[in-house]
Image (cartoon, rainbow, N blue to C red):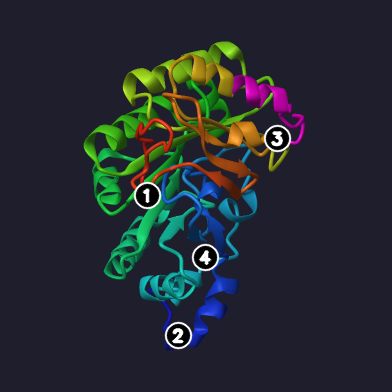
Amino acid sequence: MLRPRPEWRPDRADELWSVVRVLRRSDEKKPLNHFLPGSSVFSFGTAGCNLACRFCQNWDMSKSREFDTLTAWAGPEEIAAAAERYGCPSVAYTYNDPVIFHEYAIDTAKACHMRGIKSVAVSAGYVCPKQRAEFYSHMDAANIDLKAFSEAFYWKFTGAHLEPVLDTLRYVKHETSVWLEVTNLLIPGLNDSEKEIEEMSQWVVENLGPDVPMHFTAFHPAWRMLDRPPTPPETVKQARRIALGNGVRYAYTGNIHDPEGGSTYCHNCGQRLIERVGYSLGEWNLTADGKCNACQTPCAGVF
């Protein structure tokens, strides 16, 4: 049973901001480079996770019980009101997997939609079909973490399985209107071989299509995987090159300094459409309706 919660007042948005572990970041941080690029997103998470990733990069939240009672008063309306106050056109359910706070996320999405605010899921995609259908019927965009392209990796290092994640990716792409992007965290010696990246990116093109962006990000030692070194930048850049070579139109690097790998390019004429340096935007060569201003080719996404 939830404890009685304090009365909500608009001036409590700052309190909500500090207590619920929320951040006003750009959508590029999720990463979602093709969903309202450059806009602010109101991000929050709870505690716990349904996977047991030994390399968890958000372990301080996903493995923590510290924030367990916060939903007792940080209700859906409060979050929606705070996002509106801070001028965020979207709210992200992130840091830990939103499928474990299924009802809370859906109620928050409903409250956000009443205010014209979009909902973004950052998830590992490990969820049963029935709950998946209900959850994604309330989402507007998703970044799903494809942790590897090996069942052995999934079972040994996450306690989960690969096929349900692939099934979720296919479902979101083909059976919903949710904008989809995919992230792969490259861990040296475990899931970063050129062969695995070849197979993964080929699967994405064949099953999801060439317009689904792929993000390859660098690992740093964390949680129970402190024995692995950080991912060399060249490994991340090579993964991007492989994906592009296999027909992925929008492939990105992350967690390294790489303005080229972080920027968006027209797949037809090669012009840089959106320049990114870190999470900051520079040159912008998209028309108001999301087309390359040089050749008028549409850029896939929500603009």
Q: What amino acid type is highlighted by mark number 3?
A: Met
- Whole-Å distance between the Cαs marked 3 and 4? 25 Å
Which of 108 and 114 lies nearest the eye of the viewer? 114
Residue 288 has which mark?
Answer: 1
Label 1's element? Answer: loop
Mark 1 crowdedness (10 Å alpha carbons): few <14, some 14-19, many ≥20: few
Along the polypeptide, which appears first: circle 2 or circle 3? 2
As drawn, 213 above or below 16: above
Sequence-wise, the earlier of marks 2 and 4 is 2
> Please, what secondary structure does the residue beneath circle 3 have?
loop
State yes or no: discs 3 and 4 in contact (Cβ < 8 Å). no
Residue drawn at (33%, 61%) of the image? 109
**Which region is colored magenta?**
226-239
* Label 2 or label 1, whichever comes before in sequence order: 2
Measured along the vertical axis of the image, is residue 46 above or below residue 135?
A: below
Mark 4 nearby-residue class (10 Å; few <14, some 14–19, many ≥20): few
Is residue 200 visible in the rendered image? The answer is: yes
Quote the CA–CA distance across marks 2 and 4: 24 Å
Point out residue 139 in the picture as x, y percentages from the top left corner. 32, 52
User: Mark 2 = which residue?
Assistant: 10
- In whole angstroms, how far apart are the C-alphas of marks 4 and 1? 43 Å
Which image quarter holds the N terminus?
bottom left
Which amino acid type is shown beneath numbered disc 2?
A: Pro
